[in-house]
Image (cartoon, grey):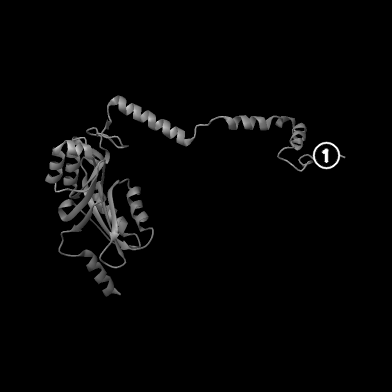
Amino acid sequence: MEKKYGAAECGDCNTCGKCDALYEESVPELKGFDDAVAAAAAIDRNSYEKNLARLRKATFEQDNAQGQQVETFRRNAVVRPTVPGHEGALLSSHHGLTLYTLIIFSENYAGILNQITAVFTRRQVNIETLNVCASSTPGVHKYTITCYCKKEMAEMLVKQIEKRIDVLQANCFVDDEIFMMETSLLKLSTPKVLANKEISRIVRRHDARFVEVNSTYSIVEKTGITEDVMDLFLQLDGMGCVLQFVRSGRIAVTKSRVERLDQYLTQREMER
């Protein structure tokens, strides 16, 4: 009687192996296949974690060789002095372009933000800051977006955004037409702050305040216009004490005596 390959004869497939031997004999090209798989599995592959650790080590050694890192205390916190002219978007120059602030009001529905940002993406306009919050009108959300562009492009963005079904109103302003504020947080090295009294004087001169102080780091909070926030950062960064820096999106209200959204909503109610 011909044996059926693959059928267990002893009832214990973990230790028998007869079925596997019969199968290899019937298919010669697969003989030794399991040995090759086992040998390949035994090789110590480079996992994602090992590659990441190797990259971090190489980066740290390179920075140390270039003198770009300064250890300030024994914990895992390193001050990285910024290279002048390489601060990224903080000090990017936009020659011939004006910073416009777009204030947009829309219904409170999901997906509106994606529709608004898609207008900027299609026209290759980069968003500098973005703030979204509920407005004083129930059911209406307010979007405050800043971008560098020309006047014609700003007006085109406003027209395209207003075409969205759920957008109630959109307007663009220059800095002279609005009151605006930003909030920033700076994480400073406490040993550096204690060793250099000028750091505390700079914080006080800029009307900033310490909101957290411990033996490792200190947190400074600064609220003001963009120029004041950036001036504080640049001065403290020049002292070599900044560990982290972050600033919020701009919030703004118009200087106009007429509330355009209220006019629009009143007119719409009258038309109904």
Q: In this view, does 141 lie to the left or right of 1?
A: left
Q: Quadrant of residue 58?
A: top left
Q: What element carries label 1?
A: loop
Residue at figure coordinates x 76%, y 40% from the top left: 6
Q: Quadrant of residue 265?
A: bottom left
Residue 250 coordinates in the image, percent (x, y)? 23, 52
The foreground one among 112 and 75 is: 75
Residue 77 coordinates in the image, percent (x, y)? 30, 37
Can you see residue 34?
Answer: yes
Residue at figure coordinates x 16%, y 55% from the top left: 177
The foreground one among 104 and 199 is: 199
Relative to 172, does residue 28 appear above or below in the rendering? above
Q: In which quarter of the image is residue 227?
A: top left
Q: Name the residue under label 1.
A: 3
Instruction: Identify the image quadrant of the C terminus.
Output: bottom left
Residue 117 coordinates in the image, percent (x, y)? 34, 52
Q: How many marks?
A: 1
Density class for disc 1 (Cα within 10 Å; few <14, some 14-19, many ≥20) is: few
Relative to 269, does residue 34 appear above or below in the rendering? above
Residue 248 coordinates in the image, percent (x, y)? 26, 50
Q: Residue furthest front?
A: 215
Tell me the amino acid under the disc marked 1.
Lys
Q: Residue furthest right?
A: 1
Residue at figure coordinates x 56%, y 29% from the top left: 43
Instruction: Identify the image quadrant of the N terminus.
Output: top right
Q: Is residue 191 left or right of residue 106?
A: left
Can you see residue 150?
Answer: no
The foreground one among 183 and 146 is: 183
The foreground one among 47 and 262 is: 47
